[in-house]
């Protein structure tokens, strides 16, 4: 198996350390691993047996995660980021992975979303499609806006097969730090903690205080307090270790007046030192916590809490609640308070056995192997169902019946390779198409692409922003009944106005397509008064004043693999529908979510439909035309089972 792992660490090296441990575990299991790292090189992280691709690094100052800097401390501009993206995609092309793992994204690294999304698009286009997994630690930084949660959830739903949560829910379930709805819960796999260290035999006697301040300069405050505490109580036997992110001058200042060797850099034998220490004093990053759990060392934790960082405090509190550590708030940290807290910790009872799962590497490898094996099947086998569909259409032709087909594609926002492929397929198959565009997200490139498309390509209004306003644990909806009608009506009206501003006037139809195909009846009834003349969703009741044309065949397995549904079952259903009557039969696609299997299926299905003499591929401009506007236009009556049309 070939696996590509993409990670960029910005503050400490914790993300890289965990990703490297997973990469080494995969390599030990016999797999070829490419680790693409976008942060600054971290000398203490072992990458034995792993191919490493170093992108032009980015970093941050303090906790300003939204402001990316280059290696020299200047702004990471467009050229710098474009080069990173190009090298990442080149690494993907060389690797030809069976599985792709993104560390933290889409739950974080939003400033690097363009390069991660480019990687995900490349993965979707590959045949066969690799398994795609997100890799996250046990505790995330609590989101400050609901929009971040929605965006992450939508990206997981659109791109990912699974989310590896590297923790034990008995200590910290993900929903302790991040909202988990049913769709996200269905993709979560708790792996246990990723223990990347080497086993250490129990020490015969634990001696001394080991202070470790992490890999970045963020631990400077702890270093200074520890040095001050050591000056006041040298008899306790201090060893103070700083990461390579602390400048030499700062480290020299911290160690001034202390015995030689008491203050130094992080060491490869850190875990052995920890196993022999009477007390560990540290922050509470992920890897430090794993080291403490693996060695059973008594601990005093000073969680990092600058900016909006909540992760370490929550982890420290959960460890403390089990009697595994003491906690000293960062705000109370100085030499005197640290010295007093150390003496209390030394006098406390030793930590009890914890039983927390540290088997995260082996379990992660097993999950990746299982998902990659599932996705390795050929995208589309010989489709016997095509013969059955062709026979049903032939029978309709012999009986003089016409079968009406129409096609809608959702979620358009910009010109992308996937949109280009969609429009090319529509043109090659000579099949008219309605592109449902998200007005608030529509870019100028979308208008240009639509203007240059085949004349039978039209656009509709796909909600306002495709934002989920449903309450927790409810199915997602932007225009459900959970908000006041006046608010929803105002947004629907705004959506049409924005669409008129951003989309070509000769392509736009005043047709409302609700996101997730969910629409409250009161808003449906209000749409004619807002300027809409058409509605397209899944089959539903007639709405006075609207022409309704619904879709009911979708080739994506949304609740399972998110790849192609069983194609034989889909073709059998389509054949039954063709035998029932004139239609129209609505086919729904989502070009941004298609993998190679779905494209291959559509490449075979649509030309068959468009070229068969019994089939009428309906132009959305005619389908949604108000009869009174043209007396010669056929009537398109509506019913609860979907739009039915008689096509001459």
Image (cartoon, rainbow, N blue to C red):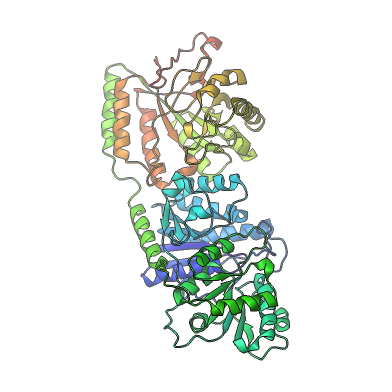
Identify whether 7 is placed above or below 426.
below
Out of 645 and 134, give the one closest to the viewer. 134
Q: Quadrant of residue 332?
A: bottom right
> Would residue 52 be seen by someone viewing this image from the given angle?
no
> Would residue 519 be seen by someone viewing this image from the given angle?
yes
Position in image of residue 74 (x %, y %) = 73, 64
Left or right side of 84 for 133:
left
Left or right side of 274 for 306:
right
Residue at 49% in and 60% down: 138
Quadrant assignment for the C terminus? top left
Out of 202 and 70, give the one closest to the viewer. 202
Q: Quadrant of residue 584?
A: top left
Left or right side of 313 for 255:
right
Residue at 47% in and 88% down: 205
Position in image of residue 57 (x %, y %) = 62, 66
Identify whether 221 is placed above or below 536.
below
Position in image of residue 144 (x %, y %) = 62, 50
Residue at 43% in and 63% down: 3
Residue at 46% in and 48% down: 184
């Amino acid at each position: 198996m070939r696996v590509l792992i993409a990670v960029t660490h910005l503050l400490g090296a914790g993300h890289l350390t965990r990703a490297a441990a997973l990469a080494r575990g995969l390599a030990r299991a016999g797999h070829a691993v490419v680790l693409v790292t976008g942060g600054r090189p971290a000398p203490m992280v072992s990458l034995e047996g792993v191919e490493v691709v170093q992108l032009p690094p980015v970093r941050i100052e303090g906790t300003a995660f939204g402001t990316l800097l280059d290696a020299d401390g200047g702004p990471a501009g467009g050229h710098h980021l474009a080069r990173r993206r190009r090298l990442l995609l080149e690494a993907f092309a060389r690797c030809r992975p069976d599985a792709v793992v993104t560390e933290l994204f889409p739950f974080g690294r939003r400033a690097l979303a363009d390069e991660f999304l480019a990687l995900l698009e490349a993965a979707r286009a590959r045949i066969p499609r690799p398994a795609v997994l997100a890799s996250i630690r046990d505790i995330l930084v609590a989101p400050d806006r609901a929009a971040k949660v929605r965006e992450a959830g939508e990206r997981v739903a659109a791109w990912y097969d699974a989310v590896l949560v590297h923790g034990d829910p008995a200590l910290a379930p993900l929903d302790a730090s991040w909202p988990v709805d049913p769709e996200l819960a269905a993709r979560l796999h708790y792996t246990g903690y990723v223990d990347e260290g080497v086993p250490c035999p129990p020490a015969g006697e634990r001696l001394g205080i080991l202070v470790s301040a992490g890999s970045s300069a963020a631990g400077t405050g702890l270093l200074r307090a520890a040095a001050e505490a050591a000056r006041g109580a040298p008899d306790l036997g201090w060893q103070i270790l700083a990461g390579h992110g602390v400048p030499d001058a700062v480290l020299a200042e911290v160690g001034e007046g202390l015995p030689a060797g008491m203050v130094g850099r992080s060491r490869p034998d850190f875990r052995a030192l920890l196993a022999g220490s009477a007390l560990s004093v540290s922050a509470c990053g992920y890897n430090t916590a794993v080291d403490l759990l693996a060695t059973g060392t008594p601990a005093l934790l000073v969680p990092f809490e600058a900016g909006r960082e909540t992760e370490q405090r929550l982890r420290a509190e959960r460890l403390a609640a089990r009697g595994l550590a003491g906690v000293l708030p960062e705000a109370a940290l100085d030499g005197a308070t640290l010295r007093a807290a150390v003496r209390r910790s030394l006098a406390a009872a030793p930590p009890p056995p914890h039983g927390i799962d540290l088997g995260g590497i082996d379990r992660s490898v097993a999950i990746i192997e299982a998902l990659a094996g599932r996705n390795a099947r050929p995208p589309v086998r010989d489709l016997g169902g095509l013969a059955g569909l062709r026979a049903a259409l032939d029978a309709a032709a012999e009986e003089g019946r016409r079968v009406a087909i129409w096609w809608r594609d959702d979620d358009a926002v910009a010109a992308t390779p996937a949109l280009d492929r969609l429009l090319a397929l529509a043109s090659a198959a000579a099949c008219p198409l309605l592109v449902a565009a998200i007005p608030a997200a529509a870019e100028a490139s979308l208008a240009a692409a639509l203007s240059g498309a085949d004349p039978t390509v039209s656009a509709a209004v796909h909600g306002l922003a495709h934002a989920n306003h449903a309450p927790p644990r409810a199915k997602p909806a932007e225009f459900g009944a959970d908000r006041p009608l006046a608010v929803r009506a105002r947004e629907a009206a705004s959506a049409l106005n924005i669409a008129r501003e951003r989309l070509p006037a000769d392509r736009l139809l005043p047709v409302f397509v609700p996101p997730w195909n969910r629409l409250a009846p009161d808003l449906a009834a209000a749409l004619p008064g807002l300027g809409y003349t058409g509605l397209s969703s899944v089959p539903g009741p007639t709405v006075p004043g609207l022409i309704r044309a619904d879709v009911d065949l979708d080739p994506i397995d949304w609740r399972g693999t998110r790849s192609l549904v069983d194609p034989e079952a889909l073709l059998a259903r389509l054949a039954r529908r063709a035998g029932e009557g004139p239609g129209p039969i609505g086919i729904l696609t989502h070009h941004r979510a298609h993998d190679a299997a779905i494209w291959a299926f559509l490449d075979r299905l649509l030309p068959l439909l468009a070229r068969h003499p019994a089939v009428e591929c309906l132009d959305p401009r005619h389908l949604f035309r108000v009869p009174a506007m043209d007396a010669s236009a056929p009537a398109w009556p509506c019913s609860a089972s979907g739009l039915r049309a008689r096509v001459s």
